[in-house]
Image: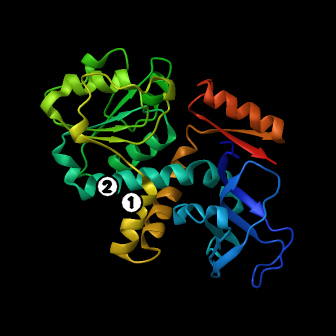
Amino acid sequence: GWGVIPVWGFADVIQSRAAGVREGERLYGYFPMGTHLMMTPGKTSPERLVDASAHRAMLPPVYNSYARVGAEPGYDPALDDLRALLFPLYATSFCLYDFLADNNWFGAAQAIIVSASSKTAIGLAAALKQDPSAPPAVGLTSARNQAMVEGLGLYAAVATYDDLKAIDAAAPAVIIDMSGNGKVLSDLHARLGDNMRYCSNVGVTHYEDNQMGPGFIRERSAMFFAPAHIQKRAKEWGPGVFDKKAFAFWREAAQESRRWLKIERAKGPAAMEAAFHRVRKGEARPEAGVMVDL
């Protein structure tokens, strides 16, 4: 069916009949691409508000929880753009880093990140680089984006999709795939063979090329779903602990992203639609981040 594509961002309460929710306060979370949204506040606290609308009840909790940013210690509206663009992605980066560390890196001597120019990949590479116990990150990207990825200084090595022989097949590897590119992934699995210790399938930046080939090793591959990992850690660490760790990582990594991230501003539904189609067609530059005011 049809739906309104969601985005992470900010919204201001312009009318409220809910106890404890005041007009004028600012929320951060998962919103539809639209100018207005009617919410049904359920569980609320000074820090968060949960949308209890019936049609959202089956979603993972993270998608229905909205930060009441005015209550955050040290909230800085100057960071709103970076938060909207990077926090959900870098939270996934931190999830992946935590998942890999929790599994002792699957015994890998290298972490091969496919679609290395994607922002989630960049966040993961940053997390791996700051941990001396982590295997070095190896970036796999297109020839068009190779220079940009190398310029980040986060990857120990960078190879292109059409030059997989540059990947060290003798070193045990864990693969974190953001691309969903079936041919590249299958060929990479085949090249590594028994040294392909585990493959975490995260995203589909190459959604039109996601048919896996005969070299794909299914028994050591699995989809990664960040909300499930967040729920796991909430049970193990207690409420809010993971959020604090992820937020601290984001703040540090987001500041570092100022070196390469170029924010583009637009206004109105037409600009939103145009930006969406650029991303869908693969025409957006990896260093670009589009902020649209609706």
| Quarter of the rendering containing residue 290 | top right
The amino acid type found where label 1 is placed reads His
Instruction: Name the residue nearer the viewer: 209 or 177.
Output: 209
Q: Nearer the viewer, mark 1 or mark 2?
A: 1
Check the image and tell me how it is coloured. rainbow
Q: Measuring from the top left, give residue 148's x and y in whole percent.
A: 49, 27
Q: Residue at x 42, y 31 (%)?
A: 180
Precedes in sequence: disc 1 or disc 2? 2
Tag 1 and tag 2, C-beta contact below 8 Å: yes
Q: Measuring from the top left, give residue 3's x and y in whole percent.
A: 69, 46
Looking at the rendered structure, which numbered label has been put on residue 229? Answer: 1
Considering the numbered disc 2 on the image, is that residue within a helix, a strand or a loop?
helix
Q: Residue furthest front?
A: 1
Q: Is residue 196 left or right of residue 92?
A: left
Q: Residue at x 71, y 61 (%)?
A: 77
Mark 2, residue position: 99
The vertical placement of 140 against 29, above or below, is: above
Q: Is residue 46 left or right of residue 226?
A: right
The vertical placement of 66 against 105, above or below, is: below
Instruction: Name the residue nearer the viewer: 144 or 205.
Output: 205
